[in-house]
Image (spheres, rainbow, N blue to C red):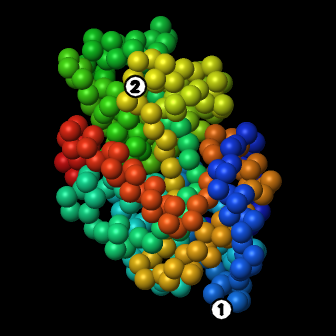
Amino acid sequence: MKTSSLANGRMPRRRVLIAGAAAAAAAACGSASIGQTVSGAKQERLRILCTGPAGSVPDIVARTFGEALAGAFSQQVVIDNRPGAAGQIAVQALKSAPADGSTWLLGQGAIASLYPTLYGKLGYDPARDLVPVSLAAEMNLGVAVGNAVPAEVADTRMLIEWMRRHSGEANAASPGTGTLPHILEAMLFDQPGLDWRHVPYPGGPPAMAALLGGQVAVLVLPEGLLLPQLSGGRLRLLGTSGRERSRFSPTVPTLIDQGHARSVMREWFAFFAPAGTPARIAEQASEAIGNVVTRAGLLRRFEDAAMMAAQSSPSQLAAKIDDDRRAWMPLLVKAGIRGDA
């Protein structure tokens, strides 16, 4: 576990898209100022529990928003990293937090939408224990290979053929069992005649280290974690998961372009509050996020991560969770993907 207080840190630059809902939410916030709690006083301390380790995508998202909220919504913002068990450790910490707006959870959408299907003994009930607050970020996934895969393998079709011929080396890493990268790998590689092995890691950074070190051949991660390694030739990006080519890597074909029609997906992250949090507090937290999501400083911090910052109302987030559950649950059951298998 890593806990740190945020001041005015900076991250490198790259362009970022802003969800259209953010501007509308920011304009509609006249009912309560960003720096006020329900009682009207600025909050002294906000703790953001994070499902990922330092340097991971959820950590970047949590710190980016934390820096923007520090001094505005709250006097101090502390990031409390609780990685492991596909987000369940962080959720358990949220369950014991007071329902007064002083503790939020930043995690992947799967903790609310997919994990009830993936885990037979999940230690929480999303409908009971997680109060939706707001979307935070969305991003494409990328399929990458390291030096363990020959340079002539230039796309995912060639990769699959290489994996068929090298079953002992056909392994694919992800930031955890049941994560969206794992699901994308299952969609790509679970096919007749292909004997491959899924290798889960506790977050993106250790999975990346395994690829760069040659322990695994393939890695699926959010695009922004892969791009910094492209210039040095340490990995090759073979495809991205969006419906259209990514603005951050426009020369890389989509998985649709390569014949994988089912492989359109975006990873997304969101803020949640503990059970029992009053609706007014959740709405106020959402409004605070809407007020900072368009700030130039926050945009600069998102740029190099190739992310699209986002904001939503609690009800919009709840609807997105339901949509994901309906879309992906049948696939999980059909593919036999289990987080506790």
Location of mark 1 (residue):
39
Element under label 1? loop
Q: Label 1 crowding class (10 Å Cα cut-off): few <14, some 14-19, many 20+?
A: few
Up the image or down, 247 lies above or below 274; here it is above
How far is the residue under mark 2 from the one under mark 1?
Answer: 51 Å
Secondary structure under badge 2? loop
Question: Which residue lies at the image location 31% right of the left edge and 21% below the top edge?
Answer: 169
- Residue on which the image places disc 2: 261
Residue 233, disc: none
Residue 329 at least partly seen: yes
Residue 1, position in %: x, y?
A: 47, 64
**Label 2: few (<14), some or many (≥20) within 10 Å?**
few
Amino acid type, callout 2:
Ala
Q: Earlier along the polypeptide chain: callout 2 or callout 1?
A: 1
Hey, what amino acid is under mark 1? Ser
Q: Nearer the viewer, residue 325 or 84?
A: 325
